[in-house]
Amino acid sequence: MNTRRLSLLLGITALTVGVLAIVSPAAVPFSPGRIVVSVIGVLALVQAARIARRRHRSTLDEAKTPDPERSVSAPQPGDDFDTVLEQFVDRRHQIARVRSDEGLSAAAVAVLVQFAGKTETEAKRRVKAGTWTDDVYAASFLGGENAPSVPLRDRVWNTLRRESGYQRRIRHTVDAIDAVVTDGSKSTDDTAENRDHDTEATSVPDDDTERQPSTTGRGRLKEGAKRAVARGAHSTGHWEGVSVIALLGIGIGVFVEQPAVVLVGVVSIGYAAYARSSVLPPGEVGIDRELDAESPEPGDEVTITVTVRNTTDRILPDVRVVDGVPAALAVENGSPRCGTALRPAEETTFSYSITATRGVHTFGPTHVIGRNLSGEIEAVRLYSSDSTLRCVPPLAAGNEPFPLRKTTEQFVGREKTSQTGEGIEFSTTREYRPGDPVRRIDWNRRARTRELTTIEFRQERAATVVLLVDARSSAYVAPHPGADHAVDRAVEAAGQLFSKIESADNRVGIAAAGSDSCWLPPSSGIEHRNKARELLATDPEFTPVPKEQKTISWRWRKTLRKRLEPGTQLVFLTPLRDESTRRIARQFDARGHPVTVVSPDSTSNRSAGNRLAGIARTLHVSTLRDAGIPVVDWSWDEPLDVALARYAARRQP
């Protein structure tokens, strides 16, 4: 027998004896003396003190409702300043946290080498001497003993500002590093883009480790959702003080021998008992959710109607309902919340609308919170159903072609090669050789000069391409809160590029970086296009909601290399968040799989950390271009066709 049941038994026994003593005193075989009554009064006062102390230290224990109105917001590159710093420092043999001056010093050296043409030794010497920048704050922060220092007048004046000295030095240093990148980019971008990207790539050793950042039809769906108890009936603490009043009344009434005071305590006990009345008995509420479209098009508004029904034979005085809106969808109109009271067999409905986006969106459980009339007791139930909204966007090609790199394939297609022979586009003429087809003899020249020459045409072959999408958790970043994240942009671009490349009679496949399960072998045709459309919209690796961390392991790289046919090109869609993406691009390119990087720029300049993340990305882009790997730098505020047109224009001689 537990303490609660024992207390209940003792209370019932005491109440029974008290009633008998009042109704029939002779029925009670003993008469409690003053000592016993005094002990009861003392115990009542002690218990009142204990409850009062516990109430003072405790808080209201009310159920917290979810916030389904807003979709999940992706972080911004650079929000975690330490994570950005680690991109510039070799962390493979270090455990301690990177200091700000250490990380920024490494960043300054890296940009001086990449964009200012300095050697690493010269760059380190300039940083230590403070001669790498004209900004005295940056020079003094990263420099040694002989570096310039901030004038005393400025230091005194800065003490009156709200910004701390440390934050000021960080901000100035990041600005100085950004200035080096900006000045260097003006003179190196054009030459980097116009470099012959089809030269033999340099060998890049495999590295099995990866540095991880610290950081339309109307249909009724599933009537009668399944109920699960999230939390049983419990006290919220609203009426905790009533017990104190009851015990104080009884204790004080005993000592002052005033029945009226004791009566106050007895009445308070009644209030306490009322406050603890039951709530939400089993089978109490029925929940139905109805969607007016199960498979909408992207951008369509879908209305969801939720019906709440009292299935009990008594009044439910306080019922609060919050529907489980999918995490990737935002509520546009209405509210997914409802608060009501329901009579027996009564029902109420509420509705809201959401805008459909790419993916398979499963509705979460509906939260139902029931309370008694006093609000002292509440219970929480979760009603789950299989309501799902499925949105599969079409593969829109756009107008700008995608420039693939030059390869040789055995399949006939539209990609021009440097080889000559059969074809439709004139390339050159050569001396006639016995056995040349008669249709390729230049008969006009034969009529003029009496010489036999053979016409050579530029051969066209089909390219084999795999679209590799970086959908790791680190790629779920956006330039500002509420914006589409880089994975959404990459998946959208993959759909456009698939349509562009496949429509040119090439064979195209799809893969996800770090995932063995997400794989569509290169092929072509209507059925293959439908498979690609389905995969990009519904594969779990491309979920619109950020998922658990996934790494690019050596095992995945080995698996992908086995899947790729010789000469298969890779179009790597990645925001270039870390060095691992740059490394994998160089490794596959060096192994005979020409790589082209399409990188949505998710960085911003909202803070020093955001700007530093942008610098790191610019460094990755420049390094890849220097290695002969083309990079399509895709600004966030422009369509993909604009970025492709700019890229093609810069590559033209």
Image (cartoon, rainbow, N blue to C red):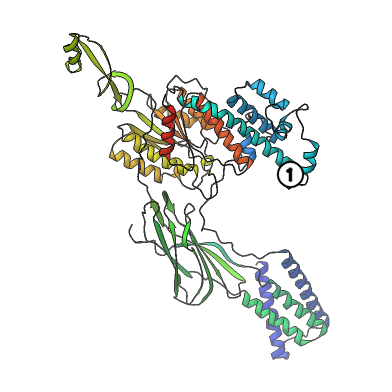
Measuring from the top left, give residue 271's x and y in whole percent: 65, 79
- Front residue of 383/111: it is 111
Measuring from the top left, give residue 624's x and y in whole percent: 51, 27
Residue occupying the point 81% across, 86% down: 257
What's the amino acid at mark 1? Ser
Circle 1 residues within 10 Å: few <14, some 14–19, many ≥20: few
SS at mark 1 in the image = loop
Instruction: Locate residue 145: give its quadrant.
Output: top right
Measuring from the top left, give residue 352's x and y in whole percent: 45, 63
Inspect this view and state whether residue 208 appears: no
187 vs 309: above or below = above
Instruction: Locate residue 592: give its quadrant.
Output: top left
Mark 1 lies on residue: 164
118 vs 7: above or below = above
- Front residue of 155/376: it is 155
Q: Quadrant of the N terminus?
A: bottom right
- Left or right for 478, reference 440: right
Q: Quadrant of the C terminus?
A: top left
Residue occupying the point 55% across, 34% down: 617
645 vs 161: above or below = above
Measuring from the top left, give residue 540's x and y in whole percent: 44, 44
- Front residue of 39/143: it is 143
Seen from this angle, which residue lies furthest front? Answer: 448
- Front residue of 13/281: it is 281
Total numbered labels placed on residues in the image: 1
Inspect this view and state whether residue 351 appears: yes
- Left or right for 491, reference 341: left
501 vs 73: above or below = above
